[in-house]
Amino acid sequence: MHGFIWWIIVGLLAGFITGKLMRGKGFGFFVDILVGIAGALVGGFIMRKLGFIGEGGLIYTIGIAVVGAVILTALFLLIAGTRD
C-alpha cells in the first residue's frame, strides 16, 4: 500500500511541476497526476536504458518523473495538436 501512495505523491508532484514547466499546457489536475505517474514509469525506463540506476531518493525520483511526464505531455500535444 505504501508503494501505491508513493506513486500517487510522486505523480502529483511531477504532474504539477510538468504543468508549470509546459506553461499551462497540461490537461487538468487529475490527468496531470496520471501523466505524472506514467511519466515516472517512462522516465525510469529511459534512465535504466541509458545505464542510470532505477532507484534513488525523493528528489531523484521526482526529477525522473518530471522528465518522463514532460516527454509524454510533449508527445500528447504533438499527436493531439496544440491546445489554445
Image (cartoon, helix red, strand yellow):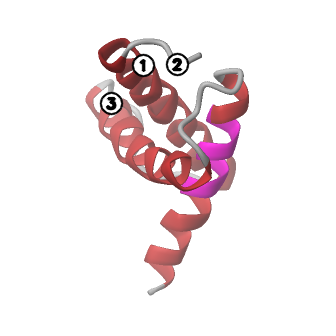
Where is residue 12, by image quadrant?
Answer: bottom right
Instruction: Tell me the quadrant of the picture where the N terminus can be found.
Output: bottom left
Where is residue 21, by image quadrant?
Answer: top right
By secondary structure, the bulk of the magenta-drawn segment is best described as helix
Number of labelled discs? Answer: 3
Return the x and y of residue 75 as percentages of the image width and height: 36, 20
Mark 3 or mark 1, whichever is nearer to me:
1
Return the x and y of residue 65 as percentages of the image width and height: 51, 42
| Marks 2/1: CA–CA distance | 7 Å
- Among the two numbered marks 3 and 1 on one chain, the one whose residue lies closer to the N terminus: 3
Q: Which mark is residue 46?
A: 3
From which residue to which does the magenta span run? 11-18
Return the x and y of residue 76 as percentages of the image width and height: 37, 25
Horizontal side of residue 74 vs 30, given as left or right: left
Kind of residue at disc 3: Ile
Q: Nearer the viewer, residue 20 or 67?
A: 20
Give the residue furthest to the front.
84
- Look at 53% across and 66% down and name the residue there: 8
| Residues marked 2 and 1 touching at CB (< 8 Å) | yes
Kind of residue at disc 2: Arg
| 14 lies above or below 77 | below
Kind of residue at disc 1: Leu
| Marks 3/1: CA–CA distance | 20 Å
Return the x and y of residue 49 as percentages of the image width and height: 26, 29
Name the residue carrying label 2.
83
Q: Give the secondary structure at mark 1.
A: helix
| Residues marked 3 and 1 touching at CB (< 8 Å) | no
Residue 4 counted in the magenta span: no
Name the residue carrying label 1.
77
| 72 lies above or below 13 | above
- Among the two numbered marks 2 and 1 on one chain, the one whose residue lies closer to the N terminus: 1
Give the residue furthest to the left.
49
